[in-house]
Image: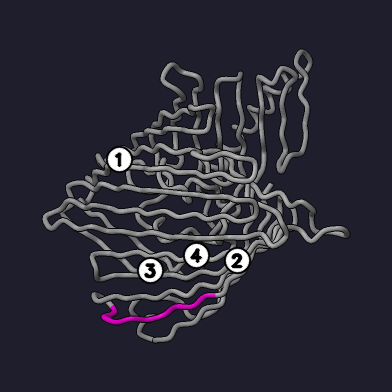
Amino acid sequence: MKIKVAVFVFLWSVCTSINAQEKENPFSIKWDNGFKVENADKSIKLKFGGRIMYDIGFYSLNDQALENGYELKSSNGNEIRRARFFTSGTLYKNIDFKLQVDYAGGKVVLKDVYFTIKNLPVGNLRVGHFKEPIRLEALTSSKHMTFMERGLPISYMSDRNSGVMLFDQFADKKMSWQLGVFTGTDASSDKQEANGTYAITGRVAGLVVKETENLVHLGAGYSYRKPQDDHTFGYKVRPETHISNKYIVTNVSDVDNVNMYNLEALWIANSFALQGEYLTANVNAIEDQDFSSYYMQASYFITGDKKTYKNSMKGLGRVKPKKDFGENGSGAIELALRYSYIDGMNTDKMSNVTAGVNWHLNSAARVMANYVISNIDNQTTYTGEGQFNAFQVRFMLDF
């Protein structure tokens, strides 16, 4: 309830500010995959929008022990994967902000909640709750992902955290750097405990090739993480489907610190795209452990369309079909294939093969279908190998 009241008060204050200035500096409203409002001299720009994602899944296991040991679900299911609304914009040309609220799962959760002071001598300063600058697929919005769920490297840490970050672009905005200090290890924006846990995360990325029909993006990220609350490092892995609600669980105790290294690459050539990442985590504890995970994915538009590249800090952007679905067009149809792998202490392993079809009806609506084959090798809990299969469909609208 407190969050709802805060959101209402914020939106009311924005509308009041707009009304007070309307006579001397009139505002205009337009639709551009979301409602956009700006005044005549463009010193104030506001955007309002959201996304709705509804998933249906069908699952099977080749061994009942997998369901008992991992609590993987072999029955069918459905869920509202995301139901988000946001407002973002620029105030007086040098302050950016964003407020994003998610209502999925019967809970109200704040996602992006931050403001940015632009054009400082050292770059731009962002404060609040937002994505840590590491992993290309994590930085890419869920609106623009190739598959319904991100690859296995996403499991090592939550994508968002609370903190402070400096960032800027250079080389004609082809390249960027980001460096932040974050507190806590929880994805929630309202965790209040001061437990001393912190992380320092940085990234350098950008275009090394930029041509009309061909671009290559490369990047590298690093994160130093100091767990103080319970001195543990662990992760939970889904077999790249969100409805199935159990994971491989890996934990290391008596951890002093964790060093994470990430390499990323993206190549877009007309209708073809190739993307991959490799992430390793060196866990310094009484018994040091190394973890690694990676994925490689390729996609191709059989309709002649292509992916768009937003920028080096946000990755992929919105697909805009050459011809929207309707009387004279079929929309954009994309075929995709991904292989991903994760290894925990050489005892908990998972490898996934995911095939996907994306039907972009227009720039705001998409239907996605994924088939996931997940091979699980566990010598701790399950002491065996097994296979989990999932077929899932998403109906998606973002604006």
Q: Is residue 18 above or below residue 388?
A: above
Where is mark 4, residue-wise? 338
Query: Which residue shows up at 62% across the image and 58% down it?
Result: 53
Q: Please tell me whether mark 2 sits on a helix, a strand or a loop.
A: strand
* Mark 3 and mark 4 residues within 8 Å of each other at the beta carbon: no
Identify which amino acid the numbered label 2 is placed on: Asp
Q: Amino acid at mark 3?
A: Tyr
Gap between marks 4 and 2 measured at Cα:
20 Å
* Residue 190 seen in the current view: no
Residue at the outermost top position: 24
When asked about the image quadrant of residue 189, the answer is top left
Residue at mark 3: 247
* Residue 280 percent across, percent down from the top left: 30, 53
Query: Does the stretch in magenta take in 387?
Result: yes
Callout 4: few (<14), some (14-19), or many (20+) C-alpha neighbours within 10 Å?
many
Q: Which residue is mark 2?
A: 55
| Placement of 366 over or under 133, stated as above or below | below
